[in-house]
Image (tube, rainbow, N blue to C red):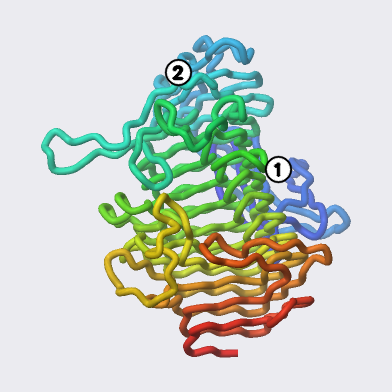
Amino acid sequence: MKFEIITVTSRSVTIELANNQCVYAVKDFEVYVNNQVAKVTRNNVVTIYDLEPNKEYEVYVKALDDTTTSNIKVFRTNQEYVTLNVKDFGAVGNGEVYDTAAIQAAILSCPANGRVVIPEGKYLSTPIFLKSNMTLEIQKGATLLGSTVREHYPILPGLTETNDGTDEFYLGSWEGDPMDCFASLLTGINVENVIITGEGTIDGNASFENWWEDAKVKRIAWRPRLLFLRDCKNVLVEGVTVQNSPSWTVHPLFCQDIKFINLNVINPKDSPNTDGINPESCKNVLILGVDFSVGDDCIAIKSGKIYLGRKLKTPSENIIIRNSHMKFGHGAIVIGSEMAGGIKNIVASQCIFEETDRGIRVKTRRGRGKDGIINGLFAENILMKKVLTPFVINAFYFCDPDGKTEYVWSKEKLPVDDGTPTIRNIYYKDIKCEDSEVAAGFFYGLPERKIENIHLENIEITFAEDAKEDFPAMMSFLDKQVKAGFFIGNATNVTIKNVSIDDVIGEAFTYVEVDQLNN
């Protein structure tokens, strides 16, 4: 067995097995730290806690039924200047009184390279604001519980004019546009070198009796996220469970060099807009070992709807997704539909998609803009189980109030203009899809701007015996399907290599206006 050390903090280390298995190793294995068993698991990504700061450790792994061990790797934990316990600042942790002031006081008092600890207990709170150069540890048995009283939440304004009149200052965001929204239970604005770690829980306390009621109605301001990061750098979120979010669960916006490792992201299947992790206009993002079970898209990569996308032209780029398990939700990995700033270089591997409506999904439409370029989506070694339609690229997505206008749904070749998006360089390889239902895949580009360079290789798709019909994509004038093959329309340079579709009804592949077909 081989492994790599992924991250080291003052109190934890995360390792990743070097194998070709999706999410889980073939057999249970032990993780040894200084010759003591620290954990027995089958997860490819493992975090060990309760280490001491600035101390050298040796780590190795061994399969339970094997006498051989991996090589030993040596690491040193980070220095830690001081530990501040929120209970020393007056936090009660009984879930009945508000502990916001005590937690916020501990954070604001924390010096550089210090750690704020939330120990076992239930801490009722309104939004907490992070600061730079610190660690926030939510320990095992601890829950940071969000208030359900809207009036207790500060508002992040969407747009604020600067005093010199040369620009605007953006804070609040709602579905890709600058709008007033409530601050999140954990909020980071312009912070860097921050670690959020631990085996505890961040619970938004949302339900259909509070935040999810009349979800599409703005009341005072738009619903908060659970964790919102704005213009942040070098942030690690590791180990914690995040659940019951009022809307998008984890939302980094205009951030770079951020890592989400070994999280549990949990929201009910029917909860509205509770996407898991939504990087928006972010650069250098790692999503590793994350377990999703949500009510909307598990991962949705975005870059602004129209206004901010066109004005700031900041793409989401260099995003790696690996060894993560996506369950339920509308899509496992989704690009768009707010992508007016562009999205490029997305790499996904060793993941399991289970009972999501779609697997890898690209959604856009006319009006997203010439800077809305999706360029470079690479996925390989993926296992999909009971995914209704594994592969979707939809350039006619009928979102927004004008989403069902002729401008959006027309299949005529319209003039290329400032609203015309681009999709190119799609590469899918070594993917197995079991018990699909609706269609193997549905790719439909714009006639005036065809999808460029699609490569499908070593893909196996089977359908469930009791498959039920549904729509393969969200676009106007589309019929329901069941056990349909691949539809590819308005594309150029398409390569199909060793793709099998069992029990298909009708043609395995249907091509409409496809140039340069290679199979």
**Residue depicted at 53% across the width and 17% down the height:** 86
**Residue 172 image position (x, y, % from top left):** 36, 36
For the question of whether residue 120 can be seen, the reply is yes
Are the residues at dot 2 and dot 1 in contact (C-beta closer than 8 Å)? Answer: no
Q: Is residue 49 left or right of residue 231?
A: right
- Looking at the rendered image, the disc whose residue lies closer to the viewer, 2 or 1, is 2
- Res 284 visible: no
Res 338 quadrant in image: bottom left
**The one of 20 and 230 positioned closer to us in this rendering:** 230
Between 244 and 476, which is closer to the camera in this rendering? 476
| Image quarter of residue 132 | top left
Q: Is residue 169 left or right of residue 33?
A: left
Badge number at residue 200 = none
Residue 102 in percent (x, y) is at 48, 14
Residue 109, percent from left and from top: 41, 19
Numbered disc 1: secondary structure? loop
In the displayed structure, 472 sits above or below 239; it is: below
Residue in the picture at 44% in, 73% down: 411
Which residue extends farthest left? 164
In the picture shown, does residue 373 fall above or below 309? below
Horizontal and vertical percent for residue 469?
71, 63
Q: Earlier in the sequence, mark 2 or mark 1?
A: 1
| Residue designated by label 1 | 34
Figure quadrant of the N terminus: bottom right
The foreground one among 438 and 147 is 438
Q: Residue at x 48, y 84 (%)?
A: 513
User: Which residue matches tag 2?
Assistant: 152
Give above or below for 404 relative to 135.
below
Q: Residue at x 54, y 22 (%)?
A: 148
Q: Above or below — where is 423 with respect to 100?
A: below
Amino acid at circle 2: His
Amino acid type at circle 1 is: Asn
